[in-house]
Amino acid sequence: YSDSASVYLEEHYSHGDLPSGLMHSFGIDLVPANGFNIGFNTDFGTLNDPDSGTGIERMAAGVRGGFGLDRLTVASAVEFRDDKSLTVDSGTTELTTWLFKNSFKFRLSPSWNLIARFNYSRSASSLGSFYDGRFTEAVLGYAYRPVDNDRLNALIKYTYFENTPSVTTTDSTTVDTGVLQKSHIVAIDATCELTARSIDGDEIGRADQQEC
């Protein structure tokens, strides 16, 4: 619509092992000021569960926003989803899900950055707390990305991950509880260029360039 506003419409048809069907999507993205952004989206449609063969009426909506300054970048989003399903005995069940997503980046210096991410989701079922679900992911990292010599880049991060998936009914007698997981993960990633590169036939292997 303009440099600061855009609107989109999407039709998404899926078929396979996951719930299949046609979904309709609508969204608006706005940039009210330099460095700021905000968006809205909604999804609705009817899907079929390949395990139980029942229909699912889905409605979802979300809002997101973020801003970026010289040294600080923050982004957040909130999403809501409501699934109404027909059971094998012609009854109706409802599963509501909230999702919160947050990311954070702070530049301590031109070469060092502090990054963080926190995602949380919770589902509530009309069948009771046994069918509820929960998901948590928290990440804290420290990144080294030098601007004067990018031959060596490194990232150390800690991740807390917890997943308690919603129980789903697979047929009239059995249920699938999914995989329950709780993990603490420490990771160190590094990339290093061991040899000089070539641009337009000129070798960048000068003596004043630092080695790893």
Image: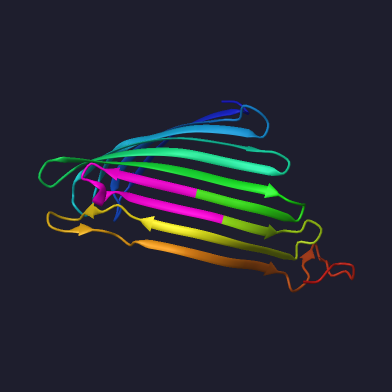
Q: Residue at x 42, y 36 (%)?
A: 10
Q: Is residue 125 magenta?
A: yes
User: Where is the N terminus found, in terms of image quarters?
Assistant: top right
Residue projecting furthest to the right:
208
Q: Nearer the viewer, residue 170 or 167?
A: 167
Q: Is residue 92 magenta?
A: no
Q: Is residue 3 left or right of residue 179?
A: right
Q: Nearer the viewer, residue 81 or 41?
A: 81
Picture mark count: 0
Q: Is residue 208 left or right of residue 35?
A: right
Position above or below: 122 against 51: above
Q: Is residue 176 left or right of residue 107?
A: left
Q: Is residue 186 left or right of residue 108?
A: left
Q: Residue at x 23, y 41 (%)?
A: 126
Q: Nearer the viewer, residue 147 or 135?
A: 135
Residue projecting furthest to the front:
129
Residue projecting furthest to the left:
89
Position above or below: 68 against 169: above
Q: Position of residue 56 (x, y in %)?
A: 24, 42
> Hey, which quadrant is residue 188 in on the image?
bottom right
Q: Residue at x 60, y 46 (%)?
A: 104
Highlighted magenta segment, given as a residue range:
119-139
Q: Nearer the viewer, residue 128 or 76?
A: 128
Magenta part mainly helix, strand or loop? strand
| Coloring basis for residues | rainbow
Q: Position of residue 140 (x, y in %)?
A: 58, 56
Q: Residue at x 49, y 44 (%)?
A: 101
Q: Position of residue 212 (x, y in %)?
A: 77, 71
Q: Position of residue 145 (x, y in %)?
A: 72, 58
Residue projecting furthest to the bottom:
194
